[in-house]
Image: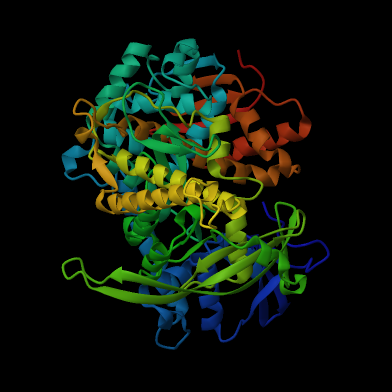
Amino acid sequence: MSTLFPAGKNTDLIPIGNGFGLKKISDDRVEFYHFDQLQKVVPRKPQIDFRLFVIDLARSYALKKNKIAEALDISRQSIDNWLDIYHQYGVSGLENSPRTPTGNKARALELQRKEERGKLERQEFHFNFSFEQEGDKKQIDPEEAPFQREHPWQKSRYAGIFVHQVTLMSTWQWFKFTIGYFGERYKLFQVFLLMVCRNIGSVEQTKHIRKDEARVILGLLQFPGKDKLWEWFYQATGECLSPRLLKDFFRFQILRGIVNLWFWFIDGHRLGYTGKRKVHHTYNTQRQMPEPGRTNMVVCDVQGNVVDFEIQEGKGDLKSFVVNLDDRWEGETGKKPVKVFDREGDGNSFFSSMVRKENPFVTWEKHSDSKKLDAMPAKLFSISFEVNEKEYGVFEDEKKYTCEYEAGESTGEKQVHRFSLRRIYLWNKSSDKRTSGLAYTPHTELSTQDCAFAILNRWGASENTFKHIQTRHPYNYQPGYLFHESDNQSIANPLLKEKQKLIKRLKTETNKLYKQMGTAKEGLTKEGTPRQNSIKERLKTQIGENELMIKKLLQEVKSLPERIELSSLNGNKSFKVIDNEGKNLFDFVTSAAWNSRKQVIEWLRPYYPNKNEIVDLFYAITQCQGWVKTTHASVTVRIEPLQQASRRAAQEQLCRKLTSLGAQTPTGKFMIIEVGDSPI
């Protein structure tokens, strides 16, 4: 993570998250900073300007309201009131006038919120699921509900995962997703949650789980065997509900403010396949070679939460995924997030389509001239900041593009699109390396430093989210393989590739012959005429034959199609596509567990002084053994205390925080977690 404010500078700034800070100059003025750089000076009067500034901090920058309130010495309730008033009445509603006093609006809003809370309490689900019909919503018998069986204290070595369960119930309404879509098959997702939290790599490995100890912490009447688990799995996948489930889950996160809408980082993660079926190839960047498999296109926010994902066949298409991302979430996001992606997204036509759709983005620049970058004077890099404990210098200029695109599919007419992008130059002063990036930010206030921060935030020392997920969780696991006929049966024309190789070989050979002819001596007869069988004449003849062959091959290449159907080569073979239903369900659980990890770590930070050990502390807590007790009113989990005093204090504080959330099971039992010695 980046250093918020460099040492010795603006120590009186109050940080409010994501590198932003506020500084109170006087009772009537506030300064707004980002990474110690002054962005604007905001007067407290007129009040409407100040309130609009606060609303912008909460909505556009997605900063936490309690931090804003503390820094500006206002109440959190005032911010909520201003946001609601702005939403219902617009800018004019924020003015204090004799006819429409803000206080009256606040009281009206309070009554409205009270009425809405009453409606929510009377509803079974607080979220509008995308069920086509009311009957689509699954129901279960009360006896099959989780944690329904009452029992005294029982030991469980898996007690620590209750941290995830409380968080998912309180923040993500976990059982309302799993039960609402799958009914009694929710038990499958409880087992998946245990697998994800304990890094159990396959369904087959569940045979090593202590079933009695796992059953009580998962709230199941009985832990399933392998055959029963596969039966549940195929019953769940047979309903093909994963697209709707994922759509609702990610929409829920966006609407509830769980994920950040400032920057969205998009990248592809390779899912390899080592079976015997013929599938399309993806690209292994570590081995630098194509391999059979799929690509999981994943969207993460600036904190590393999973916002969205889509598993694509073969190498996948990052560009179309990025272009269509706003269409997927236009109704939920409002203001378009800034997309950040790597050099795979480089290209004039792609940039043109993003600009024409006013789709903001930041990316690395491909094929940047390293010699020109190194020759730039150091004084140009006037802006300095730190990311991942490394010092950077940055400045920007403009890069112009010209691109032709089809104005209409039916007419085939082409139009010329001229546009310009922001070019961001970066200098890593620690390694003395320079590079550049590109940005397009319409309707979005992003400074040069913001764009540089976006580029470096994930592809710096921390690489990306995938690396961290797969070290702690079975992120690459595919539960069950089902194959379908692929719609894409085309391959690169092997005859075209063969001829292109031959052309390249002939050109290389011809160049060598030209060099030999330049040094060969001219053989002459007694009459002084060139000898027909001299070395030079033979070289000329060979060069002429090669050039005629190259010309002929180039003509043949023009007439050949770039891609052909596989069936034209071998009628018995065809490409298969791996069914993604099972993988989507497992990755739904992985994404939920990962995002809950992010949330719990944020809750844990204030309680532990050593910030470098926060992640390790979190996993130490979730790996704890403990004891479980279920009564008619509550589910209580007591986990063993950590030995180190500071860690135990943080552990106890976190458990108090989780208990205070008031999470409840579907039958209304409170979920309580505590730290202590054995009650048995």
Give the total number of marks visible in the rendering. Answer: 0
Q: Residue at x 24, y 30 (%)?
A: 574
Identify which residue, 231 or 462, lies in the foreground. 462
Q: Quadrant of the C terminus?
A: top right
Name the image quarter holding residue 568.
top left
Task: Please provide percent x and percent y for residue 584.
Answer: 35, 35
Task: Please provide percent x and percent y for residue 184.
Answer: 29, 25
Q: Residue at x 55, y 59 (%)?
A: 367
Q: Residue at x 57, y 38 (%)?
A: 467
Task: Please provide percent x and percent y for residue 492.
Answer: 32, 42
Identify which residue, 29 or 485, lies in the foreground. 485
Q: Residue at x 18, y 43 (%)?
A: 134
* Residue 666 shows in the view: no
Q: Is residue 221 left or right of residue 162?
A: left
Q: Is residue 522 left or right of residue 258?
A: right
Identify which residue, 382 or 469, lies in the foreground. 382
Q: Residue furthest right?
A: 8
Identify which residue, 420 or 82, lies in the foreground. 420
Name the image quarter holding residue 372.
bottom right
Task: Please provide percent x and percent y for residue 323.
Answer: 37, 59
Q: Residue furthest bottom?
A: 98
* Residue 424 shows in the view: yes
Q: Is residue 191 left or right of residue 368?
A: left
Q: How is the image coloured?
A: rainbow
Q: Is residue 657 above or below residue 441?
A: above
